[in-house]
Each structure stands twice: as C-alpha cells, then as structure tokens.
Amino acid sequence: MRWGHELYCAGHLIQAAVAHHRATGGSELLDVAVKFADHLTSVFGPPGSGKPIDGIDGHPEVETALVELYRETGERRYLDLAGYFVDGRGHGLLGGEVYCQDRVPLREATNVEGHAVRQLYLLAAATDLATETGDAELRATGERLWRAMTATKTHLTGGLGAHHAQEDFGDPYELPNERAYGETCAAIASIQWSWRMALLTGESCYSDLIERTLYNGFLAGVALDGERWLYVNPLQVRDGHTDQGGDKSARRTR
C-alpha cells in the first residue's frame, strides 16, 4: 500500500463517472464506479470489522471520490469508507512515515508536512467529510492546518513544496527562491482544498489564496503557446543556472 496507486486511480475513475453522470444522465460509467466502490467497501476496514484489509493508500485521492459518490448515490458506506481512510493516517499503517502523512493522526497535526500533493489531497478529503458529517473537529483541523500552511509554508506565488528530493514541504519558513520545487500538481491540489474550505466556511481568505495560486503558482506551469509545460516552478531561474533536467527541469520543455 505504501507505493500502490490502485486506489488513487480508482478515485479518478469514480470522479470521472460522477461527472459523466451529472453531465449526461447516463449511468454506464457510474455503474462501473459503483461496482468498484462496493468492492472497496467489502475489503477495507478496521480490525473487528470482518474486512480482510486494515490499510490505507500511500497516495490519497480515493477519499474525495468516495465522498462525491456518496453525494451522487446516497450510499452511506462510501462516506464511511472515506472517513476510515482519512482517520487511518498516523497509526503506522504506512510505516509512520512523514512522507505519507502517517506520523501523527490528522486531527492532531499542527502543520502540513511530507509530500505536498498527498497532504493536500488528504486535507481536501477531510474537508469534504466535515462538510457532509458536520464534524466540528475535522473542520477545526482544516482551518488550523490551512492557516499554518499559508503563514509558514506558502511561497509568494502560492506555490508549495520546498524540496525536490521528495516533492515535500520543508520546515516552517523554509521557502527557497531558485531551489523551490513549487510543483504544478501541488498548486492544483491547493486550489482544490481551498475551494472546499471556502464552500464549507464562507470565508473569503480561501478564495483569495485560490486567486493568487491560480494566476501564479498554477498558470506558470504552462507556456503561453500552450505547448510547453513545467513540472517545477521555482520563483527564479538565473541565466546559466544548472538544474537536473528531464521531466522535473526548471526549463520549459516541449
């Protein structure tokens, strides 16, 4: 489960199916998603539940999808499974790694940490759960971690992620200039999370960060001609600067 992306991919499939159903009314893909989700609810669960797997995916994504499928179908099992996955963090199911947000339970966390995209997808799911269940503790967790992130780990552009090595957050106020990672995926995840927080709370600060990130941290990931892209978005790249090249280069590629 540590490196597996099966549930991550399942989440994208489920979200695509929900979007297709809402747009067209057709249930062909939704039926597939429901079968997949039913399978997940049959095999994943805590000890004592009678389910064979007490485990969570190394890369969150399926959680938000399960909440969305609950919204579309009204099937409570999907919402409950999303809650199990979110609250499964911090109990050693992934080896207690910071990278996977498994160091402490999410409800006890005081700052964002580890792999930036994984952290923000997890928090987006927690916000969805708080919205649907009225869980005041989860809402407070989201508010606390969002404030910590924006105050200590967000670049001027809204970009997130200080380290290339593990695509992760650094220490508070560790915000390098030309060595920033600022992954485009993390900017997208930040927008997704802040959008949910804005809907949940009605507070304008979340929309302000969405705007800043959309026009700076996210838009920078695509060249003006629409043909070149950046995986990494440092705040500065000097002439003659040497980077690692390849897909994660700070140079625009075609």
Image (tube, helix red, strand yellow):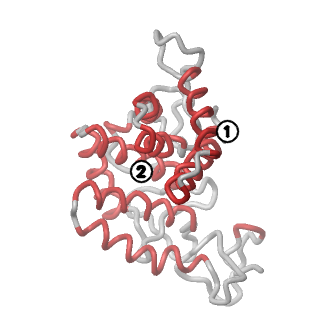
Q: Is residue 162 above or below residue 253?
A: above
- Left or right, 72 with reference to 37: left
Q: Residue 6's mark? A: 1
Q: Is residue 86 left or right of residue 27?
A: left
Q: Tell me which corner region of the image, top left, top right, bottom left or bottom right, holds residue 9.
A: top right
Q: Amino acid at mark 1?
A: Glu
In the depicted structure, whether residue 122 falls above or below residue 80: below
Q: Which image quarter holds the N terminus?
A: top right
| Residue located at (51% from left, 31% from top) | 96
Residue at (55% x, 15% y) in the render? 51
Instruction: State the image coordinates of residue 73 (x, y, percent, origin top left).
Output: 45, 39
Residue 172 falls in which quadrant of the image? bottom left
Location of mark 2 (residue): 124
Residue at the image position 72 percent from the left and 78 percent from the top? 242
User: Element at badge 2?
Assistant: helix
Mark 1 Cα shell of 10 Å, populated few (<14), some (14-19), many (≥20): few
Count every numbered label the image shows and give the total. 2
- When the figure is inspected, residue 38 is found, relative to residue 214, above or below; the finding is above
Query: Where's residue 131, x and y in %?
Result: 29, 46
The amino acid beneath tag 2 is: Ala
Of 42 and 35, the residue lying toward us: 35
Residue 154 placement: quadrant: bottom left
Camera-side residue of 169 and 121: 121
Which mark is drawn over residue 102?
A: none
